[in-house]
Amino acid sequence: MEHTITLPYWLFTLLLVFAVFLILDRILLPGMRWYLRRRVNRVIKEVNTRLDIEIRPFQLTRKQALIDQLIFDDKVIEAIKEYAKEHKMPSEVAQAKALKYATEIAPTFNAYIYFRFGYWIAKKIGRLIYRVRVGFYDDNQLKDIKTKSSVVFVMNHRSNMDYILVSFLAAEKTALSYAVGEWARIWPLQTLIKSMGAFFVRRNSRNALYRRVLERYVKLATRAGVCQAVFLEGGLTRDGKIREPRLGFMDYMLRDYHPEIDRDIVFIPVGINYDRVIEDKSLIRRLDPDAVKRSGWFVIKTTLKFFFKTMMMKRKARWRRFGYASVNFGKPISAHQYCNQENIDFSQLDQDSRFKCIGNLSRNLMQEITQVIPILPVALMAEIILQNRQEWKSELELKTAAVARIKQLRIQGAPIDISASACEHVLTSAIDMLTGRGFVKFKDGLYKADHQSKIMLDYYANSIVHWLQSSNH
């Protein structure tokens, strides 16, 4: 006798979903993970053969393992107890907060995404907008650094394009780990950025527990030899001038540094400059305390509009509008050598003495950065126009003054890469860019600075103002 079993639709659907889930979990997903892991390992093996600084095992550690290292770090455990006592809460609650902070900070580096996708998109975006130049770059600088050293690129911060520009220029040498602000904590950008080895930082956070977790992560990464990129200024320059260095990250790296037993930390100064900073008007606007804050929707709409217009331009039109983006790499500075020369052991200093010494080192690094910031045509021409802002000048007079300034800068040893054969064309393009944006008035064949745009001309001229100041002394 045959019996028919009838199932309700909802139960049949539930069983079907459950069966599909089991097939995915037991058969398809393990196979997919094995396939992806194989491709990632192949990429790691390939890139390590050509990188000057290999990918460190720490970068390949699973995120959960990194979180566990942070949570069970002795100093973090001590900070959890102090935080719980200070805020009169159970230790479990404070530990849960520390776990949240560790999860937020720890990256999920993926070599395949970094070198196959991240490098490609950074290169395309950088070259889509600018004529990219790399100067003062000695291929032996990174090769001559000891293999076990921790390399830290210290840079000035002019634009959010800095992340993209330096990442793709350094990708043939090493994989960089960035500290990125809260601007990047939006989906799906957050996942992509973390997979490229970046870690999120809450700028200006006064939370002692959070700062301790962040400090220990930076220390672990530095001690493991992870190549890092740090903006010493701590944020974007608003007026174009180099800002005073922020000492937080330098202190995290060096406060427990033992020069005789720890691996060397090698700082490489990097100078970045642009003929046109994409967000220049937004940065200048922040100088006005009465300016109304833009909404998130306005920022998104403006960004999409910008990229759409840029994509619609022909390549020559883009380069004529945005000009050059240039990066210069300076001479490496060894923390080990610095400590020996100055007879310093950071790990033995009290907080005040340590910050004083770290401040001196940071200012030395900032000085080295200013020496390699590229002098680009728009910055040079902005300086010349400001010096003659009370008078109308012909194009020939402006160019003559610019050529004389170029000769003076070369005598000073400034990083300027404008060849004699291309000088006239380059200076013409710079004048056209400033005129096209309304920063310079044009009338009857003569040019004069627009009074209302002086702040914008100052912004670009300030990127090289240190050379003007040094020539006046």
Image (cartoon, rainbow, N blue to C red):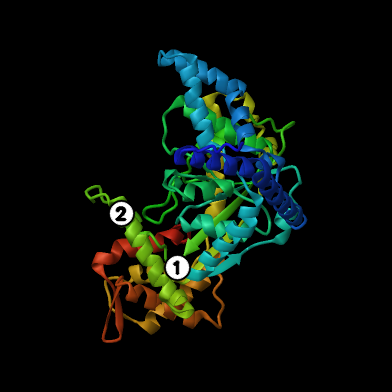
Residue 36 x/y as whole percent: 68, 51
Residue 88 x/y as whole percent: 41, 13
On screen, residue 302 versus residue 421, left or right, reads: left
Q: Nearer the viewer, residue 235 or 358?
A: 235
> Label 2: which residue?
297
Which callout, 1 or 2, points to the residue nearer the camera?
2
Quick one: label 1 or label 2, which is nearer the N terminus? 1
In the rendered structure, find residue 275 and report the number of the disc placed on it: 1
**Residue 344, quarter of picture:** top right
Q: Residue furthest bottom?
A: 444
Give above or below for 241 relative to 75.
below
Residue 420 x/y as whole percent: 55, 80
* C-alpha separation, residue under disc 1 versus residue under disc 2: 28 Å
Give above or below for 369 relative to 83.
below
Categorize mark 1 by other alpha carbons within 10 Å: few (<14), some (14-19), many (20+): many
Three-letter code for the amino acid on which mark 1 is drawn: Asp
Q: Residue furthest front?
A: 1
Give the residue drawn at x 51%, y 19%.
80
Looking at the rendered structure, the secondary structure element under dot 2 is helix
Q: Is residue 306 visible?
A: yes
Quadrant where the image shows the N terminus? top right
Cβ atoms at labels 1 and 2 below 8 Å apart: no
Give above or below for 386 relative to 18.
below
Residue 40 x/y as whole percent: 69, 51
Three-letter code for the amino acid on which mark 2 is drawn: Trp
Looking at the rendered structure, the secondary structure element under dot 1 is loop
Give the residue drawn at x 46%, y 61%.
464
Question: How many dots with numbers?
Answer: 2
Q: Nearer the viewer, residue 411 or 260?
A: 260
Q: Nearer the viewer, residue 436 or 43?
A: 43
Give above or below for 271 relative to 10.
below
Q: Is residue 130 visible?
A: no
